Image (spheres, helix red, strand yellow):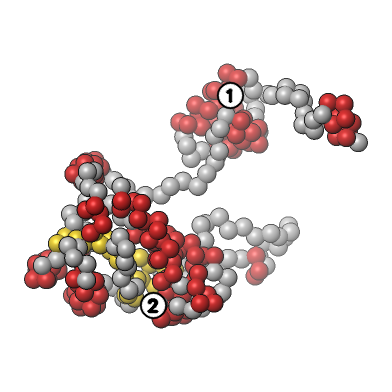
Amino acid sequence: MRVWKQWTDECRTTRKSGSGPRNVTSARDDRHLVRMARTDRTASSRQLAALWSIATGVSLCASSIRRRLLQCGLRARTPLYRIPLTHDHRRLRLQWANQHRDWRADWQHVVFSDESRFNLWYHDGRIRVRRYAGERHLPECIIERHSGRTPGVMVWGAIAYHRRSQLLRIVGNLNSNRYIREVLQPEAVPFLQSLPGAVFQQDNARPHTARIVKSFFAAQQVQLLPWPACSPDMSPIEHVWDVIGRRLARDPRPVASADELWYSALSPSSVNPSHKSHTCNYVISQAMSISRPCLAM
């Protein structure tokens, strides 16, 4: 009735600005709170409340902290993760970017390659269970966490501007000899030879930069694209792996083993029209449309 009366009298259903109880903090206090939050970006609302109490002598609950920060545009979000970069890493990355900033059509000749691992179980560390008090130790309220390496499948793949390679499964540790025998000879080199003027990109992992691998590239007359260290984020193929990982994480079908993950969702022979969106071939084809604008810049 109150909402209807407000609508008939004032033609609105929302409260007037400034109505309701007054804020505990002033505008000056809010600016101070924002400075505290920006000083330590990872501080929780409880930690900020404790720091606020120490700094001002005034108690402020965590929910009030969150509301004030939200009103100021600061929202807690999942951080972007990256590998640590030294000063030299940053310098070399910038140098590489400046050297290739004027490339245009050249990117259409680059073949980007990489390995990636896809695990059987996916979660972001923020899994929650709904339970009543006292149900903490119920089996259905417990998430198993393996102490060893999570089972999964290691794959190798490559993408060009208009084409992609077959996806190869890598079983066990990949050394330089296996890299030549299982990746370069059967797939990478024939793929490069089918593309006139192709330039091969790979990261600086030890199996990729071993002396025997360099000799193999020289013998096969493979042109390599120099690549800065610690720069996986600069390759468009990372978008392919990200799309595949997200698709697998959303797949409702349970996977019991690494072999099942490979044969049902990742292998080239797993193309099934009824489950097309779950196959790696389809995902790579879709991801190429994402990578092309990056290559065309």
**Where 182 sits versus 137, above or below?**
below
* Res 30 label: 1
Q: Give the residue at x 26% y 57%.
A: 108
Q: Give the residue at x 23% y 43%.
A: 101
Q: Earlier in the sequence, mark 2 or mark 1?
A: 1
The part of the image, by quadrant, that contains residue 292 is bottom left
Q: Answer whether labels 2 and 1 touch (C-beta < 8 Å).
A: no
Residue 230, percent from left and from top: 27, 52
Callout 1: SS: helix
Does residue 283 appear to the left or right of 135 in the view shown? left
Q: Give the residue at x 34% y 51%.
A: 294
**Where 35 sits versus 101, above or below?**
above
- The kind of residue tagged 1 is Asp
* Res 268 label: 2
Residue 122, percent from left and from top: 50, 64
Callout 2: SS: helix
Nearest the viewer among 220 and 85 is 220
| Residue 7 visible at all | yes
The extreme right residue here reads 1
State which mark lies toward you, 2 or 1.
2
